Amino acid sequence: QVQVVESGGGLVQAGGSLRLSCAASGRTGSRYGMGWFRQAPGKEREFVGAISWSGDKTSYEYSVKGRFTISRDNAKNTVYLQMDGLKPEDTAVYYCAASDLMEPGWYRGEYDYWGQGTQVTVSS
């Protein structure tokens, strides 16, 4: 079993920055692609971005492209979501997910293990 734990959420003013972290643990030797999703109240959970196991490939949802950056440190089994230029519409619970695919995409079904989520609130 794989455990995924997010941290780093909080309250920030519009235009500010936050960095979320995601630690994955469990099956040693496994190679996971990782993704970030978010869910605002009353809305569906949506894709934010993903990163391949090697870290050389990333993809982003259109509205966050150029503002958010995903990176990873495999030595620490940790993935990061750097969020800059935050907007009130970025307010949501952010979820980290691990995939048995080394290069997962936007589809939720590609992700096998999910964290509990961390709240990000952006005030105007």
Image (cartoon, helix red, strand yellow):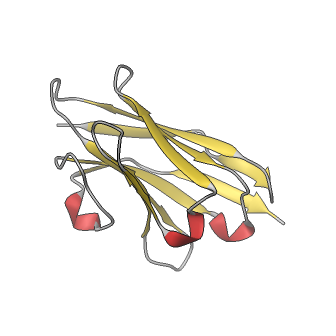
Residue 44 appears anywhere in the view: yes
Quadrant of image for the C terminus:
bottom right
Q: Is residue 64 left or right of residue 32?
A: right
- Give the residue drawn at x 80%, y 57%: 15
Location of residue 118 in the rendering, given as x and y in whole percent from the top left corner:
54, 49
Task: Relative to 94, say whether 21 is above or below.
Answer: above
Task: Relative to 50, say whether 88 is above or below.
Answer: below
Location of residue 92 in the rendering, given as x and y in whole percent from the top left corner:
58, 63
- Give the residue drawn at x 35%, y 19%: 75
- Give the residue drawn at x 51%, y 55%: 94
Location of residue 99 in the rendering, given as x and y in whole percent from the top left corner:
23, 49
Q: Is residue 49 left or right of residue 92?
A: left
Residue 36 appears anywhere in the view: no
- Give the residue drawn at x 53%, y 80%: 42
Q: Is residue 1 left or right of residue 89?
A: left
Q: Quadrant of residue 89?
A: bottom right
Quadrant of image for the N terminus:
top left
Location of residue 97 in the rendering, given as x and y in whole percent from the top left corner:
34, 50
Task: Relative to 25, say whether 35 is above or below.
Answer: below
